[in-house]
Image (cartoon, rainbow, N blue to C red):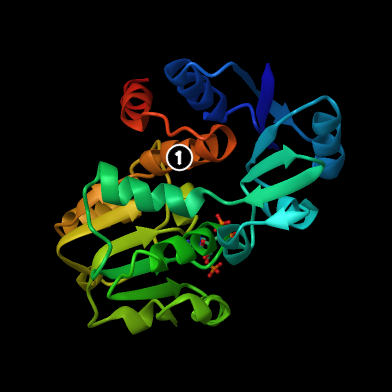
Amino acid sequence: TDRYAVIGHPVAHSKSPQIHRRFAAQTGQDLHYDALLAPLDGFAETVRGFIADGGCGLNVTVPFKEEAYRLVTRLTDRARAAGAVNTLSFRHGEILGDNTDGAGIVRDIRVNLAQEIAGRRVLLLGAGGAARGSVLPLLQEAPACLVIANRTAARARTLAEALAAHGKLRGCGFAELSGQSFDIVINATSAGLSDAAPEIPDGVFAPDCLAYDMLYGRETPFMAQARRAGARVSDGLGMLVEQAAEAFLVWRGLRPDTLAVLAELRRS
Ligand code: ATR
């Protein structure tokens, strides 16, 4: 039986085992999927132990995505652009690093929420790892524009410059957003974790705007603001399931049915 796991610290709260076991059952794949706790100073050692035990792949969660990026022998383009790895595959002595987070949000928006990204004005809030992972997959959808706005404006500008070769994008601070509006606004800041919201003007939400928060499991102040401004609102649970499905596809060559799993997670 092929073995997979999610590696993190902490990791007990992770929904990945539940999601991947459902995918495996659904597609008839014979695999084991566990949660693997790595010591904060023992990520590489834990990965090597897992490989030595015959493990086939790992999903990487906080706080190891950047360390995983440095550990690999080969990277996909989207992992390189993300500067972080959330999916590791072990084959023929190689450690292949991929990043499925951006593909996950793109698929959730396009397929599950049925919102076209092509030709739309997209605003990405935040300039940390969560934001960075989505830039290349969003640009590949050919939006009319992609603006990255961050509390610390310089970080947004640096990120936009670093990925400028991949498409038309611009970095700025929140204040510079006044007078601009967008069709899709994605909150990739961690503000919601402390019940705060990025301080953006209500005007960024165009009529019929989709406001997407990468967080899930709570109504964030960003979601509340977007609702008041008349936007359609989504949390990030769909992104979680879709990034997992994309990792499953990388490992097993099959795309599982995510809607059934998403519905199940919503109920629980
Ligand atoms: P992650 O990997 O989750 O993106 P990170 O790299 O620590 O985590 O980045 C956190 C992001 O959330 C940053 O964009 C941060 O803004 P700064 O670069 O200005 O620090 C943003 N953030 C966190 N708390 C915020 C708040 N209360 N308001 C606005 N932005 C916030």
- Where 154 falls versus 64 (above or below)? below
Q: Residue type at mark 1? A: Leu
In front here: 247 or 264? 247
Q: Residue at x 67, y 43 (%)?
A: 88
In front here: 98 or 218? 98
Q: Is residue 143 left or right of residue 126?
A: left
Q: Residue at x 35, y 29 (%)?
A: 262
In front here: 218 or 122? 122
Secondary structure of the residue carrying numbered label 1:
helix
Q: Residue at x 50, y 81 (%)?
A: 164
- Where 265 falls versus 84 (above or below)? above
Which quadrant of the figure has residue 219?
A: top left
* Image spot of residue 170 (x, y percent): 42, 81
Q: Is residue 195 left or right of residue 178?
A: right
Badge 1 local density, few (<14 within 10 Å), some, or many (20+)? many
Which quadrant of the figure has residue 179?
A: bottom left
Name the quarter where the N terminus is drawn: top right
- Where 231 falls versus 168 (above or below)? above
In front here: 74 or 171? 74
Question: Disc 1 designates what residue?
Answer: 240
Q: Is residue 19 visible?
A: yes
* Image spot of residue 267 (x, y percent): 32, 21
* Image spot of residue 265 (x, y percent): 38, 25
Q: Is residue 153 visible?
A: no
Q: Is residue 87 left or right of residue 266?
A: right
Name the quarter where the C terminus is drawn: top left
Q: Residue at x 69, y 23 (%)?
A: 3
* Image spot of residue 109 (x, y percent): 30, 50
